[in-house]
Image: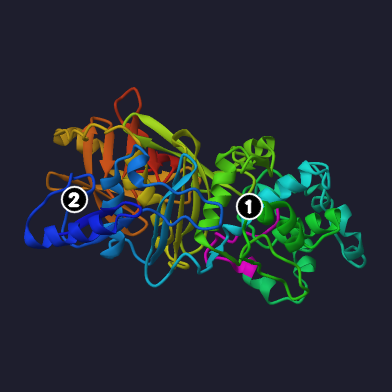
Amino acid sequence: MIRYFYRQKNSFPLYFLCILFFATGFTLFPVDKCFSISNSDYFYRTPTKTSDGWETASIYEANIHAEKLFDLIHNIRNGNYKNIHSLLLVKDGKLILEEYFHGFHHEKAHQIRSATKSIGSILTGIAIDHHFIKGTDEKIYPYFKDYEIGQKWNEKVRDVTLETLLTMTSGYACDDHEIPNFQCEKAMYKTNDWLEYALNLPMAYKPGEHWAYNSSSLILVSEMISKTSKMTVPDFANTYLFQPLGISEFHWGFSPKGRAFIGGNAKMKPRDMAKIGFLMLNSGRWNGKQIVSQKWINQSTRDHAKSKSYRGYGYLWWTGKQLFGEQFITGYWAAGNGGNYIFVCPALSFVAVFTGGNYNSILEVQPLGMLINYVIPAMLPPIPPRQITKLGSTILDSCVGEYQLQSGHIRVSVFKKGDDFYCKVLGKTSRVYPEKEDKFFVPDEVFGDWTFKLERNEKGEVTSAIGYAAFQVMPFKKIK
C-alpha cells in the first residue's frame, strides 16, 4: 500500500510516530495529518523557509484538495510522468509545495530553455517603463544602421517592430516549429555574429500578419535593450529585475560576440522561476516594490496572435484556456524545451513551476497534462463525475471520419471498433467516451483529458468539431 505522510513544521515526533504506527498497524492521528492513499511511501514536508524571500506554508493551510496533488507526485515518482525534475506550487503568495526528483534539488540551477523568452519580455517591459525604449511600435532596423552597409534590406524588413518580434509575427522566413525543428536557431549558432544573421534573415510575409516561432530574431530585442539602456543585458537584468527579486544566480546564454540571448539557453533555480511567476501574478510587485508595470503585464499576457495549433501568444508568453466541467480556466505561461514551465493562473491565484528533461520530445508538454488532471482540479470545488452516455450506432457512424485542424497542422481520425469509439491523433490511439450526442470525452493521463464538441448542418451531418485540449481551443473541419 502507498502511504502519504504529512509532516508539519517542527513536528519530528509526529513524523516518526506516523511511520511507527503505520508499520505496526495502529493509527492515533487525524487523517489530515498522517494518512494512507495508495501503495508506496511519500512524505510531504512544508517547503523550507530560507533567506531567499519566500514565505512558505503548509499545503493544508491553502484550502485545496491536497490528496489530488499527492496523487500527482506518486505518478511522477512511479514513472507515469517521465523525466520530471521538479514541481513547485505557490498559492496566495506562499510556497506550499516543493518537490525534486532524479537527484535535482533546490540549490541546483536548471536549464529553462525558451522560458528565457518570457523573462526577456519582462525586461522589455521594464525598459519601456523606464523610458529607455519608447514603446512596442518602435521600428528595429534604425538601431542597427552600422550593419546596413553592403546589405540589400527590402522595404518589408523596415516595417519590423519590437511588437512583431515579441509576438512572433515579424514575417521572417524562419519557423523553428517546422520539421525538422529549430533550423534557423541551429543555423544561427553556427555563425560568428548572431546579430548579423538575424538582421539578414529573408522576409516571407508582411510584418504583423503571420505567426512563426522564431528564436533567432530575439537577439535583436536583447541588443535593443542594451543599446537604449547603455548596459549589458545581464547588468540591466541584475539591476532592474534579479536584485529586487533576490535572485542571485542566473546563467545567461551568450553569442560568440558576448551578447546575452533572451531567446533561450538560460539556467536558474526553480524557486527563482516561481518568483518570476509570482511577480506576474502579483501585478508586477515583489515585497511591496513595483518592478514592472501592471500595464505591461496586461499587454504581454493577452492574445496578440495564434500559433498553428491555435494556442494564444502574447509578448513572449503563451496563453490559453481549458474546459473544466462547464467552466473555462485561463492561464499564461513560459515554456522551454524539455518541459520547463512557469504557469500563472490569476483566477485561482496560483503559480506552478515544472522542470524536466524531455528535450525534443512530445513529452515536454506533460506539465500541461499535470495541470489539467491534478493541479487545477485540486484548486476547484469538486466537479461532478462525467456521465457516459450510450449512443446508437447511427449517431456514432455519423461521427466517424477524418477531421483536420483549420490551419492544416493536425489531423484526427475517428473510428469504431465494434461498439467502442476511438480517435487517433499524432500517432496515438485513444478511447473516446460520449457524454452527450455531440459532446465526447478523451481521457489522457499524460497530456491531460480533453473534450470535443461536434457541429452539424441542417441535415444532421457532422461538418466540424471544436477540440478543448492542452489549453487550446482548436477548430476542426470534417474532411471525409
Instruction: Say which quarter of the image contains residue 237.
Output: bottom right
Tell which of 437 and 230 is nearer to you.
Answer: 230
Tell which of 194 and 340 is nearer to you.
Answer: 340
Say which quadrant the N terminus sits in: bottom left
Q: Secondary structure at mark 1?
A: helix
Say which quadrant the C terminus sits in: top left
Asked whether, in this view, residue 277 is left or right of residue 299, the answer is: left
Q: Residue at x 18, y 45 (%)?
A: 31
Tell which of 187 and 206 is nearer to you.
Answer: 187
Q: Residue at x 34, y 55 (%)?
A: 10
Q: What segment is highlighted magenta in the picture?
A: 170-185
Q: Secondary structure at mark 2?
A: strand
Whether residue 74 is visible here, answered yes or no, is yes
Q: Residues within 10 Å of mark 1 (few under 14, many from 20)?
A: many
Disc marking residue 122: none
Residue 194 located within the stretch drawn in magenta: no
Q: Position of residue 23 (x, y in %)?
A: 11, 63
Q: Position of residue 462 (x, y in %)?
A: 32, 33
Whether residue 310 is visible here, answered yes or no, is no
Q: Residue at x 16, y 33 (%)?
A: 389
| Amino acid type, mark 2 | Phe
Q: Which residue is mark 1?
A: 245
* Predominant SS along the magenta part: loop
Asked whether, in this view, residue 85 is left or right of residue 304, the answer is: left
Instruction: Say which quarter of the image contains residue 16.
Output: bottom left
Q: Residue at x 74, y 56 (%)?
A: 239
| Amino acid type, mark 1 | Leu
Q: Which color mode does the image show?
A: rainbow
- Return the residue found at the far top: 458
Q: Which residue is mark 2?
A: 35
- Give the CA distance from mark 1 to mark 2: 37 Å
